[in-house]
Amino acid sequence: MMIQLLFVAIGGFFGSIIRFFISNRLNKHFFGTWIANISGSILLAILLRYYLTGTIPDYLWLLLGVGFCGAYTTFSTFGNETIQLLLAKKYQTAMYYVLSSFTLSIILVGIVLVW
């Protein structure tokens, strides 16, 4: 169990650092969170597909799927930014942000898993 936690922690360490870098570089108009969530969904779908078919071992799933993607994508930040848009009365931007985040993530995950 300790080795599994170590893989998750190492993956989370790197996922959070890359997420922080993307946010600092691209978070004008919440673009950084959007990029992280969309790209993280695609990466997680690819990893899940390989994990479910036995192509990647458990430790790689824990490192990249659970640890890295878990820290890289941030639903809490997405929720906070949506609320900020709503409080700023940017209703149309908030709607596009929410709909495009969910729609693109789901479509791209579906494409990767069916591919």
Image (cartoon, helix red, strand yellow):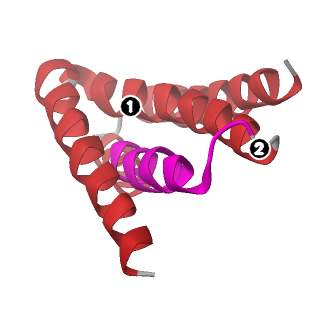
Q: Earlier in the sequence, mark 2 or mark 1?
A: 1
Left of 83 or right of it: where is 106?
right
Name the residue at 51% across, 55% down. Answer: 59
Where are the magenta residues, as a range?
A: 55-74
Name the residue at 59% across, 27% down. Answer: 42
Left of 84 or right of it: where is 78?
right
Amino acid identity at mark 1: Ala
Q: Is residue 101 visible?
A: no
Q: Nearer the viewer, residue 48 or 89?
A: 48
Name the quarter where the C terminus is drawn: top right
Q: Which residue is mark 2?
A: 54
Amino acid identity at mark 2: Gly
Q: Position of residue 96 (x, y in %)?
A: 54, 26
Name the residue at 55% across, 30% down. Answer: 43
Q: Nearer the viewer, residue 61 or 79?
A: 61
Q: For the residue labelled by badge 1, is the local secondary structure a helix, a strand or a loop? A: helix
Q: Is residue 43 above or below residue 87?
A: above
Q: Few, some or many C-alpha atoms within 10 Å of disc 2 (few <14, some 14-19, many ≥20)?
A: few
Name the quarter where the N terminus is drawn: bottom left
Quarter location, residue 32: top left
Quarter location, residue 93: top left
Q: Which residue is mark 1?
A: 36
Is 50 within the magenta?
no
Q: CA distance from mark 2 to mark 1?
A: 26 Å
Q: Position of residue 79 (x, y in %)?
A: 41, 53
Q: Is residue 15 above or below residue 18?
A: below
Q: Is residue 111 visible?
A: yes
Q: Nearer the viewer, residue 100 or 68?
A: 68
- Name the chief secondary structure element in magenta: helix
Q: Few, some or many C-alpha atoms within 10 Å of disc 1 (few <14, some 14-19, many ≥20)?
A: many
Name the residue at 19% across, 21% down. Answer: 28
